[in-house]
Image (cartoon, rainbow, N blue to C red):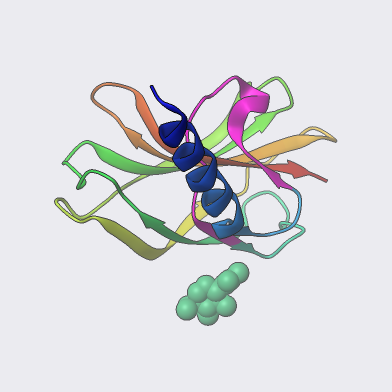
Protein backbone atom coordinates (compact mmCIF):
# COMPACT_ATOMS: atom_id res chain seq x y z
CA UNK A 1 0.00 0.00 0.00
CA UNK A 2 1.57 3.29 -1.00
CA UNK A 3 0.81 6.85 0.00
CA UNK A 4 -1.35 7.55 -3.04
CA UNK A 5 -3.61 4.68 -2.15
CA UNK A 6 -4.08 6.10 1.34
CA UNK A 7 -4.88 9.55 -0.06
CA UNK A 8 -7.36 8.06 -2.50
CA UNK A 9 -9.00 6.11 0.32
CA UNK A 10 -9.33 9.22 2.46
CA UNK A 11 -10.76 11.09 -0.49
CA UNK A 12 -13.32 8.34 -1.16
CA UNK A 13 -14.24 8.26 2.52
CA UNK A 14 -14.87 12.00 2.46
CA UNK A 15 -17.01 11.78 -0.67
CA UNK A 16 -18.93 8.90 0.85
CA UNK A 17 -19.68 10.78 4.02
CA UNK A 18 -20.82 13.87 2.13
CA UNK A 19 -23.11 11.73 0.04
CA UNK A 20 -25.21 10.52 2.97
CA UNK A 21 -28.72 11.86 2.97
CA UNK A 22 -31.08 10.80 5.69
CA UNK A 23 -33.47 11.90 8.38
CA UNK A 24 -31.59 13.65 11.21
CA UNK A 25 -30.28 11.44 13.99
CA UNK A 26 -28.55 8.86 11.79
CA UNK A 27 -25.21 7.18 12.26
CA UNK A 28 -23.29 4.41 10.61
CA UNK A 29 -23.75 0.96 12.13
CA UNK A 30 -20.47 0.85 14.06
CA UNK A 31 -22.71 1.53 17.10
CA UNK A 32 -23.97 -2.04 16.53
CA UNK A 33 -20.46 -3.29 15.76
CA UNK A 34 -21.43 -3.62 12.09
CA UNK A 35 -18.66 -2.59 9.76
CA UNK A 36 -20.50 -1.75 6.54
CA UNK A 37 -20.64 1.31 4.34
CA UNK A 38 -23.46 3.66 5.19
CA UNK A 39 -26.53 3.85 2.94
CA UNK A 40 -26.51 6.60 0.29
CA UNK A 41 -29.94 8.01 1.05
CA UNK A 42 -32.60 6.85 3.48
CA UNK A 43 -35.62 8.98 4.26
CA UNK A 44 -38.54 7.74 6.29
CA UNK A 45 -41.86 9.19 7.32
CA UNK A 46 -43.57 9.88 9.53
CA UNK A 47 -40.75 10.96 11.83
CA UNK A 48 -41.42 10.64 14.78
CA UNK A 49 -42.88 7.30 13.76
CA UNK A 50 -46.55 6.49 14.35
CA UNK A 51 -48.11 4.21 16.97
CA UNK A 52 -47.74 0.44 16.94
CA UNK A 53 -49.43 -1.10 13.92
CA UNK A 54 -49.05 1.95 11.72
CA UNK A 55 -47.01 1.93 8.55
CA UNK A 56 -43.62 3.50 8.18
CA UNK A 57 -42.60 4.54 4.70
CA UNK A 58 -38.90 4.33 3.91
CA UNK A 59 -37.42 5.76 0.73
CA UNK A 60 -34.09 4.30 -0.23
CA UNK A 61 -31.58 5.30 -2.86
CA UNK A 62 -28.53 3.10 -2.97
CA UNK A 63 -25.93 2.43 -5.62
CA UNK A 64 -24.48 -1.06 -5.38
CA UNK A 65 -20.91 -2.10 -6.10
CA UNK A 66 -22.13 -5.59 -7.07
CA UNK A 67 -25.49 -6.29 -8.77
CA UNK A 68 -28.27 -7.74 -6.62
CA UNK A 69 -28.85 -11.49 -6.47
CA UNK A 70 -32.01 -13.36 -5.52
CA UNK A 71 -30.66 -13.25 -1.96
CA UNK A 72 -30.19 -9.51 -1.73
CA UNK A 73 -32.76 -7.99 0.61
CA UNK A 74 -33.65 -4.58 1.94
CA UNK A 75 -34.32 -4.91 5.65
CA UNK A 76 -35.98 -2.49 8.03
CA UNK A 77 -35.51 -3.40 11.68
CA UNK A 78 -36.62 -2.01 15.01
CA UNK A 79 -34.32 -2.87 17.89
CA UNK A 80 -33.60 -1.76 21.41
CA UNK A 81 -30.32 0.10 22.05
CA UNK A 82 -28.54 -3.23 22.50
CA UNK A 83 -29.63 -4.29 19.01
CA UNK A 84 -32.19 -6.76 20.39
CA UNK A 85 -34.61 -7.29 17.52
CA UNK A 86 -38.19 -6.20 18.22
CA UNK A 87 -39.63 -6.13 14.72
CA UNK A 88 -38.37 -6.35 11.18
CA UNK A 89 -39.28 -6.77 7.57
CA UNK A 90 -37.19 -8.09 4.70
CA UNK A 91 -38.04 -6.95 1.22
CA UNK A 92 -36.82 -8.80 -1.86
CA UNK A 93 -35.20 -6.70 -4.56
CA UNK A 94 -35.17 -7.04 -8.30
CA UNK A 95 -32.22 -9.21 -9.26
CA UNK A 96 -29.24 -7.97 -11.20
CA UNK A 97 -29.77 -4.28 -10.52
CA UNK A 98 -26.96 -2.01 -9.44
CA UNK A 99 -29.09 0.77 -8.06
CA UNK A 100 -31.98 0.77 -5.61
CA UNK A 101 -34.40 3.64 -5.82
CA UNK A 102 -37.63 2.61 -4.22
CA UNK A 103 -40.12 3.02 -1.42
CA UNK A 104 -40.40 0.29 1.20
CA UNK A 105 -42.84 -0.18 4.05
CA UNK A 106 -42.56 -1.49 7.58
CA UNK A 107 -45.16 -1.95 10.30
CA UNK A 108 -44.28 -0.23 13.57
CA UNK A 109 -44.06 -2.83 16.40
CA UNK A 110 -46.66 -2.66 19.17
CA UNK A 111 -44.23 -2.07 22.02
CA UNK A 112 -41.00 -0.21 21.54
CA UNK A 113 -38.78 0.78 24.47
CA UNK A 114 -38.28 4.45 25.39
CA UNK A 115 -35.09 4.42 23.34
CA UNK A 116 -34.86 2.35 20.23
CA UNK A 117 -33.08 2.08 16.91
CA UNK A 118 -34.34 1.82 13.37
CA UNK A 119 -31.82 0.00 11.20
CA UNK A 120 -32.02 -0.09 7.44
CA UNK A 121 -29.70 -2.44 5.58
CA UNK A 122 -28.99 -4.04 2.26
CA UNK A 123 -28.02 -7.60 3.08
CA UNK A 124 -27.07 -10.74 1.26
CA UNK A 125 -29.42 -13.21 2.95
CA UNK A 126 -27.48 -16.28 1.79
CA UNK A 127 -24.12 -15.35 3.28
CA UNK A 128 -25.31 -12.89 5.90
CA UNK A 129 -23.08 -10.21 4.39
CA UNK A 130 -24.19 -6.69 5.18
CA UNK A 131 -23.65 -4.53 2.13
CA UNK A 132 -24.88 -1.20 3.46
CA UNK A 133 -26.32 -0.08 6.77
CA UNK A 134 -27.67 3.00 8.51
CA UNK A 135 -28.95 3.48 12.03
CA UNK A 136 -31.46 5.97 13.33
CA UNK A 137 -31.35 6.67 17.04
CA UNK A 138 -34.76 7.41 18.51
CA UNK A 139 -36.28 9.32 20.05
C1 LIG B 1 -40.94 9.00 -0.41
O1 LIG B 1 -41.24 8.94 -1.78
C2 LIG B 1 -42.59 9.26 -2.07
C3 LIG B 1 -42.80 8.99 -3.55
O2 LIG B 1 -41.85 9.68 -4.32
C4 LIG B 1 -42.86 10.69 -1.66
O3 LIG B 1 -44.22 11.01 -1.93
C5 LIG B 1 -42.59 10.84 -0.18
O4 LIG B 1 -42.74 12.19 0.21
C6 LIG B 1 -41.18 10.39 0.14
N1 LIG B 1 -41.00 10.40 1.60
C7 LIG B 1 -39.88 10.83 2.18
C8 LIG B 1 -39.84 10.75 3.66
O5 LIG B 1 -38.93 11.27 1.55
Q: Can residue 111 be seen from the camera position used here?
A: no
Locate residue 90 relative to residue 109 in the image: left or right.
Answer: left
Residue, x 75% and y 41% (percent of image)? 137
The percent coordinates of residue 135 (x first, y second) are 63, 40
Q: Can residue 37 be seen from the camera position used here?
A: yes
Asked if the stretch drawn in magenta spans residue 127, the answer is no
Q: In which quarter of the image is residue 70?
A: top left
Locate residue 118 relative to residue 39 in the image: left or right.
Answer: right
Q: Is residue 31 above or below residue 12?
A: above
Residue 98 or residue 88, whichever sits in front: 98
Q: In which quarter of the image is residue 33?
A: top right
Q: How many marks?
A: 0
Q: In this view, does 63 lie above or below 45?
A: above
Residue 20 or residue 81, whichever sits in front: 20
Instruction: Give the magenta range.
Output: 26-43
The percent coordinates of residue 11 (x first, y second) are 52, 47
Residue 27 or residue 47, whichever sits in front: 27
Q: Which residue is farthest front?
A: 3
Locate residue 112 relative to residue 103 in the image: left or right.
Answer: right
Q: In which quarter of the image is residue 45?
A: bottom right
Q: If the image is split into quadrants, where does the N terminus sit? A: top left
Residue 115 or residue 55, whichever sits in front: 115
Residue, x 85% and y 35% (percent of image)? 114
The percent coordinates of residue 86 (x first, y second) are 61, 30
Residue, x 68% and y 26% (percent of image)? 31
Q: In this view, does 67 lie above or below 44?
A: above
Amino acid sequence: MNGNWILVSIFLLLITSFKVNANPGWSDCSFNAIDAPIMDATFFSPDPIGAGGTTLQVNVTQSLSKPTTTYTKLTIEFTDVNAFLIGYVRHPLDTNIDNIEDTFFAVVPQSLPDKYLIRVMVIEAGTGDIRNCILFHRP
